[in-house]
Image: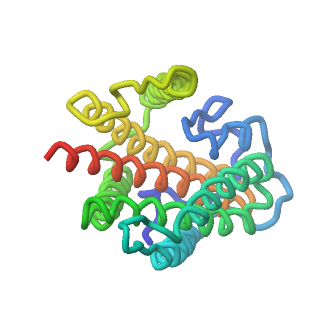
Amino acid sequence: MSSFGNSRNSNQQFRQTPRYNVPYKTSNPALSERRFAERTWDGVGERMTLEGTANKVGILLLLCLVSALFTWSQVGITSGGEVYGVGGWLVGGAIGGFIVALVTTFKPEWSGVTAPLYALLEGLFIGGFSALLEMRYPGIAVQAAGLTFGVFISLLLAYKTRLIRVTETFRSGLIVAMMGLGLVYLVGFLLRMFSGYQLPFFQGGIIGIGFSLVVVAIAAANLLMDFDFIEAAAEEGAPKYMEWYGAFGLMVTLVWLYIEILRLLAKLRSDD
């Protein structure tokens, strides 16, 4: 994989003045500003590099793919048309991935172990979820994967060439958008739990499709924030284990983007 930077040297000497005014701003909770704010990395030994982080992203993607293919292979259909063999892997992967993500967020120094574990667990969830939708909408999983990596590569190139710049206004706007999105999901969850009513945002139709497009755009924009955050951390001389932590944060966004694209495609095909 190519590095996230353009002309910047990821091995440059540690600087005392941070790239961002403290704290670092990112809408990805995994790449929390608390991991870098008000820190000096004096005496940490080997430093984080962009190339090292890119390689670790590749490792996490491979692990996720392997476990997703495993779950996919476990899915079967009974003579009555009922799906079996996926529920346990799907739920276990989702819950396990969430727990490991929390641990990694609070203990980034453990990310050399927890990041690969997170990728494997999320692969179980992705594989199961994709297989279920694939049975209803043949070909949807490949389409979602292709679109996800297409968006990833396109935004990486746009960031490297500085075609798109992550400005302070961009960061602030995206953080506000994330807060609004979180509020919508919270309200939708509470209404569904206590009244059984489902907001039109989470259904098919024009409103549901429009909402999914917005969510996909927000998830994609988070990739730019992740690229910028990782590059800044490398320039500030973060320790070597932060390569795994940065790769983990980017993986969180990619998983989210893939799931949202999968949902969008399902809504589009349900209206055919």
Q: Residue at x 29, y 32 (%)?
A: 208
Q: Residue at x 61, y 64 (%)?
A: 88
Q: Is residue 208 left or right of residue 26?
A: left
Towards the viewer: 112 or 83: 83
Measured as percent of width and height from the top left, residue 264 is found at 30, 45
**Is residue 257 shown above or below 123?**
above
Measured as percent of width and height from the top left, residue 265 is found at 27, 50
Q: How is the image coloured?
A: rainbow
Q: Is residue 132 left or right of residue 109?
A: left
Specify the farthest residue to the left: 272
**Is residue 208 shown above or below 16?**
above
Towards the viewer: 248 or 135: 135
| Quadrant, the N terminus | bottom left
Q: Quadrant of residue 167?
A: top left
Figure disc tally = 0
Measured as percent of width and height from the top left, residue 54 is found at 52, 67
Q: Residue at x 28, y 50 (%)?
A: 266
| Residue 54 appears in the picture as rendered | no
Q: Residue at x 69, y 47 (%)?
A: 15
Q: Quadrant of residue 160?
A: bottom left
**Is residue 205 shown above or below 241?**
above
**Is residue 136 shown above or below 52?**
above
Towards the viewer: 147 or 74: 74
Q: Is residue 127 left or right of residue 148?
A: right
Measured as percent of width and height from the top left, residue 210 is found at 26, 32
Specify the farthest residue to the front: 80
Towards the viewer: 208 or 220: 208
| Residue 149 appears in the picture as rendered | yes
